[in-house]
Structures are given as structure tokens and as C-alpha cells.
Image: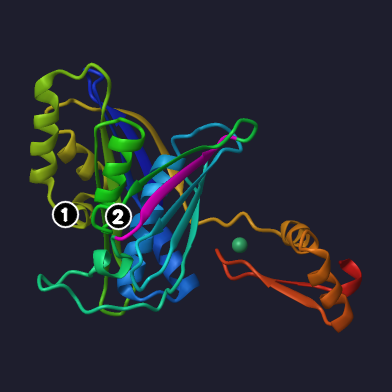
Amino acid sequence: MDEIIRAISSDGFVSISVITSRDLTERARKIHGASPVVTAALGRTLAAASLIGGALKKEGASLTVRINGGGPAGSIIAVSDHEGFVRGYVGNPLADLPLSPKGKLDVGGVVGKNGMLSVVKDFGETEPYSGAVELVSGEIAEDFAAYFAESEQIPAVCALGVLVDRDRSLLEAGGYIVQLLPGAPDGVAGLVEQNVAATGAVTNVLSGGGAEALLESVMGGFSPRVLERCRVEYKCACSRERFLAAVTSLDKGELDDMRAKGEPVEAVCQFCNTAYTFDIEEL
Ligand code: ZN
């Protein structure tokens, strides 16, 4: 079961959100038939989208992340609802690259770094908030840290990890975002950096002690107080009604072509592969 834990330091200057996301990443891998390196790229993006989206809180709000680095994976899209339930897809899920010289999945290589990471927060009634930054490395976590620094002016550290087994199934996935809140004294950032360095790879800590171990390690010395824990999962928001509305909003020429053919129209959801079929009379 995947979950998000949010906590704050006893002095109120450091907040952290931790996610375990193995099950939702496995679901994404199976839906898209993704290669291990693309699973890692998509899994990291889904984890970050869930962490940020789940903090929106407002009923009906949603968050959309787009990463387009020009690499062989193509664009990565992840959408989260206000509770951190996520869905996503990748332009080319089968893209593959050899392991890096250190034996790691080459996420930066498959994503590319010649492009942007954009985030759109849609709260419903008001204009959506949107921000975008140039990709730093295409490794995703660093790119989100740059997004927080440049677009939201919040000093943040982000770490994300996805560990894929030899049979391509998911061993571990998850990560965290730590943010310094306004007024944090000088020494605080240094202590967070030390903790982050000492914590090391997210997936190692998760396999040893789960989300709690990750939280305790990154927040060492800060006496964190847990504010909330909530379950998250891969969840698509599509429905027959939504697709019917989308098909009928196509331009008149396309609709006339469909009617002229007289065959049922099939639409497939990019996020979950559900196929919806509509009779011509329905259109
Ligand atoms: Zn769907």
C-alpha cells in the first residue's frame, strides 16, 4: 500500500513530505508496458506529482506535470488530484538505454535535458497557476528542486527513487520533498543538507525501514511531528461520459466523417488503456 506522510520540525522551519509509491508505479508500468528506465522516469514523476498535488487540498483541484527533455522517452505527463491520487503516461514507453557506467538506470539520458518541466495547478474556479523551469539534468528530482527554487521561491530538496527488479517488477519506489519555511535560521539549511547526504539513496532506506525510516533520517535533529498520513494510489478519472463529451466536441468535419463511415467509434484512455466504444447513433 502506498502512502504519503507529512511532518514538520518542532521549530516549525522545516517541512517534509515522504511518499512510498511502489504499488502505483507497478500499476503504471503494467498499463504502459514500460521499459525499466522509462518506468523509473515515469515513477519518479508520478511520485513528485502525488506529493505536490496531494498538498493542494482543495476539493476538485488538480496538478499536471509535463516534462519534455527531448530524450528517447518523449514527453512525460503526470496528473494528480487534490488527494495525491495520480495517473500518467509517456510518449514512448518502450524507449530503452544501456545502464550508466555506475550500473544505474539512465533516467537523465532517456528523459533528456533539453527542455522544460512545467507544473499547472488548477483550483477550479480561478485561473490555473502555472510555472515552468528549464530541465537541469532530466533526472527528475533535481529538476523539481529547481522548479521550487525558481518558480515558487521555496528552498527545497527533492529526492526520488525507483528500483526495478531483474524481471522488471518494482522492488521499491518513493521519495521526499523537504522545504525550508520563511524565517528559517541560517544553520537549518546546512543541517538539512547534511541529513540528505547521510540518508543516501531513497530506495535503500525504503527497503530497510519504509517511509518512517526515510522521514526520521532526513529530519534527524529536528524532532519532526507527523501532521498527516494518507493512502495514495494510481487512479484514472476517465469515464464513458467524459469520452463521449470529448468525441462530440471534435470539429464538425471529423464528426461527419465518422457518421459517413457508419462504424462504431473507439476511444482509448491514454492514462489507463480503457477503451470506450460509441455507436454512431450516440454521437
Ligand atoms: Zn482512464
Q: Which badge, 1 or 2, comes first in the chain's sequence?
A: 2
Left or right: residue 262 versus residue 111 is right
- Tell me the kind of residue under disc 2: Ile
Left or right: residue 101 versus residue 50 is left
The type of colouring in the image is rainbow
Return the residue at label 2: 140
- For ligand 1, the image quadrant comes to bottom right
In this rendering, which labeled residue sits more in front, label 1 or label 2?
2
Q: Is residue 229 above or below residue 246?
A: above
Specify the segment rendered in magenta.
114-123
Q: Is residue 264 above or below residue 27?
A: below
- Tell me the kind of residue under disc 1: Ala
Q: Nearer the viewer, residue 250 or 55?
A: 250
- Which element is circle 2 on? loop
Return the residue at label 1: 201
- Which element is circle 1 on? loop
Q: Quadrant of the C terminus?
A: bottom right
Residue 24 percent across, percent down from the top left: 43, 59
Residue 73 percent across, percent down from the top left: 38, 71
The image quadrant that residue 22 belongs to is bottom left
Q: Residue at x 61, y 38 (%)?
A: 60
